Image (cartoon, rainbow, N blue to C red):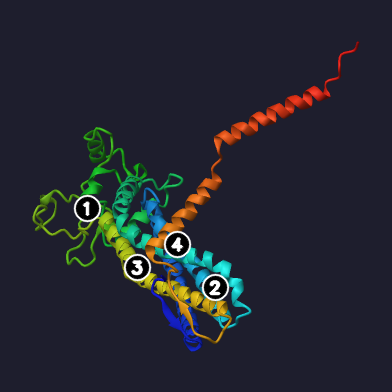
Amino acid sequence: MALLKMKFSQQRRVRLAQGLWLLSWLAVMCGAFIFCLGVYLKIELLRRDEVMENTEIHVVPNLLMMVGLASIGANWVASRVCQDSLDASRFPRWKVLLLGWFAVAMLLCCLLLAVVVLSYALQGSLEESLKVGLRNGIRFYKDTDVPGRCFQKETIDRLQMEFRCCGNNNFKDWFEVQWVSNRYLDFTSQEVKDRIRSNVDGRYLLDGVPFSCCNPASPRPCLQNQLTDSRSHYNYEYQSEELNLYSRGCRQALTDYYMGLMNSTGPGVLSIILIQLSVLLSMRYLQTAVEGAMALESPEGESEGYILEKDVKATYADVKAKALDLLKFAQVDPTSEAAGAEEGEKAAEATEKAATPPPAS
């Protein structure tokens, strides 16, 4: 018994083909949108590549670009099938290709669903990557003369100004690293000597932050240095004063930004999955209805269209049986292999005996 069986007259088949043609081109545009979305997300991730430890999160834009291109191709093929379905002489050539098309269409839906899941599941990986990457970026901030790190200062400064953040977790992260290069330190100064001697690792540590941490919205001029000393600034209390620095850490700012981008793709991708499923089901109805009319040798007569030729249980049993047959065909019987080897050895021995000349009398 066929599953979800429907009757299709010639007029209904034509309308189904026309509607599916329009739906296929809508799916093509959705595929182009998915591809562009993947490219945009990829570019945004590459822009901050210097403050990321790994590229695991890149699997999301990579999947979007791959699925977008595949969707454009698959749905373009669907539009061609719709055109040929109205011609009994041209439709049979698609019979074998449609099996592969259905497999590709189902795979696209599964991959799109995987993109939605990964967009939420990779948040922890993104946070850890940013945590390590930003920590290294802050540590190498001063290395403007070191090849490969000379642009690190500019990257961090632009990042903090653009995302209105400071440090990895907060501005206190700058207290734990030497962010002023030795090139700009006066080692004859007693203050510099005292700071270096007071540190076990011999680093010049400050209770200050770079200029890019300053919040221009603050009414007070920026306080960058001696932030923990309330006596160094008039009318200032370190513990209670609302500092004129960005309070949010850059790790949280970047995580919110990227997760906002990826989470916003979720509803759109789910909508595209529904469109792709509609194309898939409509194509199945069109295929079975046209093939049914051709089998009745009445192109203008009424035919049946369905999703599955049998019910779900019977279809599953058929697929399972075919899969087992394929596995049995692919397996090599060890007993037959051993018997073949023995026969080969006997044949080789017989050949050697025939080739050996008889002993001279």
Q: Callout 4: helix, strand or loop?
A: helix
Of circles 2 and 3, which is in front?
A: 2
Question: Circle 3 is placed at which residue position?
Answer: 265
Looking at marks 2 and 1 on the same chain, the residue that comes earlier in the sequence is marked by 2
Instruction: Indicate the position of residue 228 as horizontal and vertical percent values.
Output: 15, 49
Instruction: Indicate the position of residue 154 as horizontal and vertical percent values.
Output: 38, 55
Q: Give amino acid for label 3.
A: Thr
Q: Give amino acid for label 4.
A: Leu
User: Is residue 320 found left or right of 247 in the rendered image?
Assistant: right
Which residue is rendered at x = 61% and y = 72% of the image? 93
Mark 2 neighbour class, 10 Å CA radius: few under 14, some 14 to 19, many 20 or more: some
**Labels 2 & 1 near each other (Cβ < 8 A):** no
Of circles 1 and 4, which is in front?
A: 4
Quarter of the image with the N terminus is bottom left
Looking at marks 2 and 3 on the same chain, the residue that comes earlier in the sequence is marked by 2
Question: Circle 1 is placed at which residue position?
Answer: 170
Alpha carbons under labels 1 and 4: distance apart: 44 Å
Looking at marks 2 and 4 on the same chain, the residue that comes earlier in the sequence is marked by 2
Q: Give amino acid for label 1.
A: Asn
Q: Give amino acid for label 2.
A: Val
Alpha carbons under labels 3 and 1: distance apart: 29 Å
Question: Circle 2 is placed at which residue position?
Answer: 77
User: Is residue 122 found left or right of 66 in the rendered image?
Assistant: left
Q: Nearer the viewer, residue 263 or 93?
A: 93
Question: Circle 4 is placed at which residue position?
Answer: 107
**Labels 3 & 4 near each other (Cβ < 8 A):** no
Kindly identify which numbered label has been placed on residue 307.
Answer: none
